[in-house]
Amino acid sequence: MATVIVVKKTHEIDAGLWQKIVSGFNESFGLNVNVDGLKNGWYISNPWGYAYHAMAMDENDELMAYNVFTPARYDNGLNVVVSGSTFVRPQYRKQVMLFAQLIKALRQRCSDDGFDLEVGVPNHNSIKLSKTLGKSMPAIVDSCWKFLCQLHVKSNRLLSRLFNPHERDRALSISTDETFYSTRFSNKEYITVNDDHFKFVYRLCDEEEKRVAYLMDFREGDKKSYRALTHAIHHIVKSTTVDAVLYVGFMHFKQALMMKAPKKMAPKRLPLTCYILNKDNKSLQVDVSNPDNWNFSLMSFDVR
């Protein structure tokens, strides 16, 4: 069976091919997205305004497999692409080299276009929250628990007035300038709050009959801080009705408000992978090998 690998930018894909992509996406992930929702979401929510799409086509011009590299600008002038939205349609999954062919073509194209690094989060479509959120509790227990949570948040707000550590700079951190915020969180489903000296972004989602607030980012000035974290969660708890507030990512400072989910209760692991596109950048090869150099969170890839 002949296979042709095609790489196109978002705006170069015609309507017919978009329909094939959406059909394959829904078939593979059990979703019901439409063309506008897919192509006008994560793929253009970056300073470039487009992503790189790799498609494997058979001799009948049917879509076999698909993968996307979405650009992101990191500190220190690094141009990064984030790998995601990967699928191989069921009838083609015996062709084990399809994904490798897509990745090879994308890496070559993005390397030629001056990108330095590729990052990815395999299995990111498998965030399961049932164990984390637990079963429903009796009304009296639920009311007491919510009261204790509100008291915990207020206590931490007071504590943060006395003890307010900030995040430490990391070599590999996404640039969070105004261009980033206006593109990454342009979707109306993201709620951005500018309040006094604080700025934070969150999104409300229904997960297995639970209402969850995903905290995407929180800042005091231009850095994450304990005080900004308490301010953001206090706002979410006070202004919305949620069962849980989740932050997925590194939090490079000490805090007493949020707890790390135990391994047995945590959603499926989200391993961070990387591949250096710019082989001439010797310092980058050193930086990526040290986990402490990474500042990576949910806002850095295409989930929630």
Image (cartoon, rainbow, N blue to C red):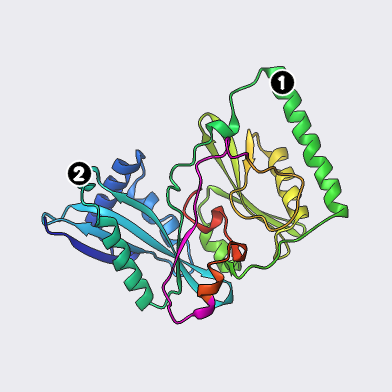
Q: In the image shown, does 230 or 111 lie closer to the viewer? A: 111
Query: In the shown orientation, is residue 285 left or right of residue 251?
Result: left
- Determine the secondary structure under disc 1: helix
The number of discs equals 2
Q: Secondary structure at mark 2?
A: helix
Q: CA distance from mark 1 to mark 2?
A: 49 Å
The image shows residue 29 at horizontal and vertical percentages of 35, 42
**What residue is drawn where x is 77% and y is 41%?**
153
| Residue 274 x %, y % | 46, 63
Q: Amino acid at mark 1?
A: Val
Q: Amino acid at mark 2?
A: Gln
Q: Label 1 neighbourhood size at 10 Å, few (<14), some (14-19), many (20+)? A: few
Nearer the observer: mark 1 or 2; the answer is: 2
Question: Which residue is at the front of the view, 192 or 69?
Answer: 69
Residue found at x 58% / y 40%: 263
Membership of 275 in magenta stretch: yes
Horizontal arrangement in the rendering, residue 281 relative to residue 1 (left or right) = right
Image position, residue 299 (x, y; %): 55, 56
Label 2: few (<14), some or many (≥20) within 10 Å? few
With respect to residue 139, does 89 lie above or below?
A: below
Q: Which residue is mark 1?
A: 141
Residue shown at 35% from the left, 78% from the top: 112
Badge 2 is on which residue? 91
Q: Which of the 4 image quadrants contains residue 39?
A: bottom left
Mark 1 or mark 2: name the one nearer the start of the chain.
2
Where does the N terminus fall, quadrant-wise?
bottom left
Stretch in magenta: 262-283
Which is the main secondary structure of the residues drawn in magenta?
loop
